[in-house]
Amino acid sequence: MSSGRLSAYSAFLRTRWLAWRLRTRGAVETHRARNLDRMMREVVTRRPYYRDKGITRFDQMPVMDKSSLLADFSQLNSAGLSADQVREALERGEERLDGYVIGRSTGTSGNRGYYVISERERFVWLGTLLAKTLPDALWARHRVALAMPGLPRLYTSASSGSRIDLRFFDLARGVEAWAGELAAFSPDTIVAPPKVLRYLAERDLLRATHLFSGAEVLDQIDRSIIEDRTGRIVRQIYMATEGLFGVACPYGTLHLAEDAVAFEWQAAAERSALVTPLITDFTRRVQVMARYRMNDLLELSGTPCPCGSPFQAVARIEGRQDDIFLLPGRDGGRRPLTPDVLRNAVVDADRRITDFRIIQREADHVEVRLEETVAAEADAAVEASLVRLFGRTGLAPVRISVERGIALPLDRKLRRVCREWHEG
């Protein structure tokens, strides 16, 4: 057995063992503390970025974001590679640099993130993901269809497993270009953005037993359509350039990967239940990912899941910090409105709305786009619903325009709520 496959096998078994061993919140917290201590001793204190600051305890570590990570990139990875070196290598079409696996994010927010990992870490990632998605992968064969943007080196490692027949489907070609190939492949498992799962479900082309959504927010509108059409539960994979953060259980509840990542929480906005995670991945050794502020907006769940997992459940991933609208308040300042509030105002306006876009175009201009097929009276209902919302939240008059026509973006992530206007 190759060293890579051995690493994946070991990670698979360890993940399954931890799922059995970590049965209570107390056990999860003890596991977290023990691994953070080990990470501090074996990784963090050996990096110049932390050593030069005299940091020896986890609570002394500064909170990082994408800009600070990129600025100090070479001091945070054991290879000493700078972000510019990684970027230039990727632009040359290379996926390795100095013996390390490199990659980048899709750049949805306009600023790409980069990663450096070892070959071993790539296979550890694979084993962990398989243990959480296909726990019978060691003895049962699976045909997996993958239609996901980015992270090619990570995913292609899955094809090295003799029991997994993995087929890639290029989103850039358009779904209709390979829908026939997908049907001929007849996968039992498919991993794709929710917009792709919905497209296939609406055309009766989604026959797989296991449906996994990734790369984009799984909107309740899409979930309902997919599950109603297929009779299958859609399971979400919460993953980014920074790591694997959660996988939904067979009941469809997204559970955070607290066996591998420590989570802290910051309030996303005033008077909102949404939070933004700070993540610390204690499985990584090449590149430190500690107290890193993600751009995501999550609503945590306090309801126990029928699966019995003690890992924190997530009610919804609602979008990104970048997409919190900043609209003029009656007091002269700017008031934030989170994507969930805006989404609900549009969807609740008319039950026939099954797709939409909400965009802050200017400082005081909000545009809503609806499907051509929705009844004409939906326009006035949506506008009235937003007027009520803006009035309740203390906004000054905001120009609202309702337009028709929605394109399905396959070359970029779907963001139904999007702030294009930026202050200053």
Image: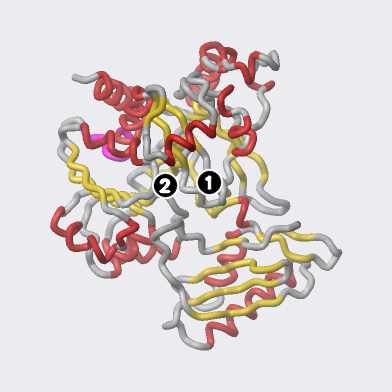
Find residue 253 and name its label.
2
SS category of the residue bearing label 2 = loop
Tally of numbered discs: 2
* Residue 326: percent from left, percent from top: 71, 60
Residue that appears at 46% across and 20% down: 285
Q: Which quarter of the picture shows residue 140?
A: top left
Labels 2 and 1 touching (C-beta < 8 A) = yes
Question: Quick check: is 181 in the magenta stretch?
Answer: no
Q: Is residue 180 above or below residue 302?
A: below
Query: Which residue occupies the foreground of this view, 300 or 242?
Result: 242
* Residue 50: percent from left, percent from top: 64, 18
**Location of mark 1 (residue):** 301
* Residue 385: percent from left, percent from top: 63, 76
Q: Is residue 277 above or below residue 404?
A: above
Q: Earlier in the sequence, mark 2 or mark 1?
A: 2
Find residue 283 and name its label.
none
Coloring scheme used: secondary structure
Quick check: 411 left or right of 398?
left
Residue that appears at 38% across and 25% down: 121
Which amino acid, mark 2? Thr
Give the magenta part as a residue range.
131-137
Disc 2 crowd rating (10 Å Cα; few below 14, some 14-19, many 20+) is many
Q: In the rendered view of the protein, which quadrant contains the C terminus?
A: bottom right
Query: Which residue occupies the foreground of this view, 254 or 84?
Result: 84
Residue that appears at 50% across and 19% down: 78
Which amino acid, mark 1? Ser
Outermost residue on the bottom side: it is: 376
